[in-house]
Amino acid sequence: MGKRPTFYEDQAMTLLEVHVLDFAGDLYGEQVSVRFDHRLRADAKFASVAELTEQLQLDCEKARRLLGGRAG
């Protein structure tokens, strides 16, 4: 949850983006429920999309550890 500062410096609205671990399907147009278990990190502005992608990989690893095998 945040303002996507890497892409939008002046984003006024807070957005929610959800990454579903180990899921390759299409959920567009579907209704989903989201439960917050842990905050992974604060919102951050990255110097490049590559840097953001690296951080997202680390976020996924951290989420897997925190969920203790309940992902997917």
Image: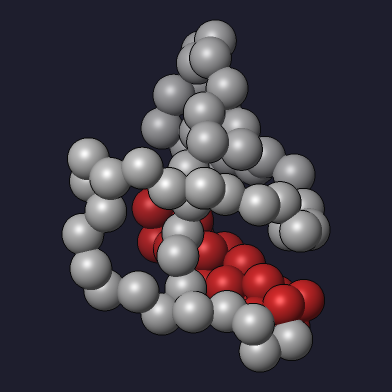
In the image: residue 30, left or right of residue 31: left
Residue in the picture at 61% in, 38% down: 1
Outermost residue, bottom side: 69
State the residue in front, 35 or 18: 35
Residue 61 higher or lower than 45, as above or below: below
Residue in the picture at 36% in, 42% down: 31
Residue 7 higher or lower than 19, as above or below: above
Tell me residue 17's x, y (percent): 48, 43
Residue in the picture at 21% in, 59% down: 26
Residue 20 higher or lower than 39, as above or below: below
Tell me residue 3's x, y (percent): 56, 27
- Name which quarter of the figure residue 66 lies in: bottom right
Can residue 21 be seen here? The reply is yes
Residue in the picture at 76% in, 58% down: 37
Tell me residue 28's x, y (percent): 23, 46
State the residue in front, 31 or 4: 31
- Name which quarter of the figure residue 14 lies in: top right
In the image: residue 16, left or right of residue 24: right
Give the color scheme: rainbow, by chain, secondary structure or one colour: secondary structure
Tell me residue 43's x, y (percent): 67, 40
